[in-house]
Amino acid sequence: MSKSIYHVAPGGRLSGRLRVPGDKSISHRAVILGALAEGITAVEGLLEGADVLATIAAFRAMGVAMDGPQGGQLRIHGVGLHGLREPLAPLDCGNSGTAMRLLAGVLAGQSFASTLVGDASLHQRPMGRILTPLTAMGAQIRATDGRAPLHINGACLHGIHYVMPIASAQVKSAILLAGLYAEGESCVTEPAPTRDHSERMLAGFGYALRRQGSQACLRGGGRLQAQTLVVPADISSAAFFLLGASIAPGSDICLEGVGINPTRTGVIEILTRMGARIELTNLREVGGEPVADIRVRSAPLQGIRIPRHLVPLAIDEFPAIFIAAACATGETIIEGAAELRVKESDRIAVMTAGLKALGVDIAEHPEGARIRGGSLGGGIIASHGDHRVAMAFAMAGLAASQPIRIEDCANVATSFPDFPRLAREAGLALQVLEA
């Protein structure tokens, strides 16, 4: 893969109406449940990024026929819960932690052996958090120091009542997917709310699931029935335009059809607390998920102490929040965000280094940072192959006084392959160079 470089000229403003790609989390789950369902599942608005394509390729390697994706449309010829075939080679998850962790849950209960691999970055991300509960269910999985590759021997699973030590939608989803194959009831209790796309979609596919407070439970042995799904626009991708329009004077944009699942709207609440002018209009429901058009106009931002309870609800959007804090008046405190250290990069360290390169007063803490807002200069940013870091610093160019060069941006294609074009159309002076 080439190592694309973003060059962003300073200044400008964002305007117009645009639609960001389909939600990545929902797209993964649509492919997984559609493959395990009985009948043909039709998906519209699917994200055609590298991460989701890796999940599609994995199920094709296990005998699931699919038409597409093309133009966000995908038809999945489901094989039922017990119709997967043993793959002839390791299943490559690329850069996708979601694909690896959720596939591990599915594969743990199969009647065959399989291996999950990924790129160098994914092989550094912790998998112990799924290995512990899956092993307790009877799964046979070998890893190296809790990391990929994962060698899975299909096994007979039994239900588990698991209290998660760390809030993680991927861990919760891996257990629930394994629970489809387990004898008895599988329950997951989370310490703080996380995205509930798996629970919503399982119910949408006709699988009996019980939710009570912070606990979700299901019994193995059921069936999934094919559905027609519409994937809303991804709020994690929209977040970069929420940021850009907020920090660039004179900006006024409308983001169409964005998913506003209450377990995902932490970034809207955090930016609003900082003074952002964000308006939700045309509220509706699409495919069991709440959706809205989001209008954002520029506004002066103020530093805040981000409430800890909002951190899990915005965990993927923190690169954008770091930039917002750097552009705000006063000090922003981020706490309780240690999960950022085990994303596609150590996002606390990488965002700290990048903001220092732009002249921002920032102090890194073990579970967050203190950021004193002010003016942004220019400089060279190492994104460490992290798609969200790259896009966040691209939007920082709107408030910078000098050009910003962001290195190693090819992985933006994992979640937002059309980002450069959409950003330019909205008003960002972005050039893509090949290293």
Image (spheres, rainbow, N blue to C red):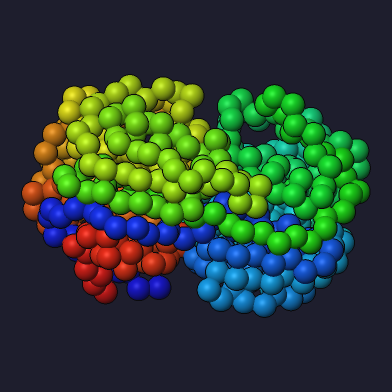
Q: Is residue 185 visible?
A: yes
Q: Is residue 410 left or right of residue 121?
A: left
Residue shown at the point (37%, 25%) measured from the top left:
306
Between 244 and 139, the one nearer to me in the picture: 244
- Using the image, determine if residue 278 lies above or below residue 224: above
Q: Hey, which quadrant is residue 429 in on the image?
A: bottom left
Can you say which quadrant of the picture contains the N terminus? bottom left
Q: Hey, which quadrant is residue 16 in on the image?
A: bottom left
Residue shown at the point (27%, 60%) measured from the top left:
426
Can you say which quadrant of the picture contains the C terminus? bottom left
Q: Is residue 263 left or right of residue 398?
A: right
- Using the image, determine if residue 215 lies above or below residue 321: above
Horizontal and vertical percent position of residue 262: 55, 35
Between 108 and 268, the one nearer to me in the picture: 268
- Using the image, determine if residue 89 lies above or below residue 339: below
Q: Please identify the residue farthest to the front as the structure is shown.
A: 282
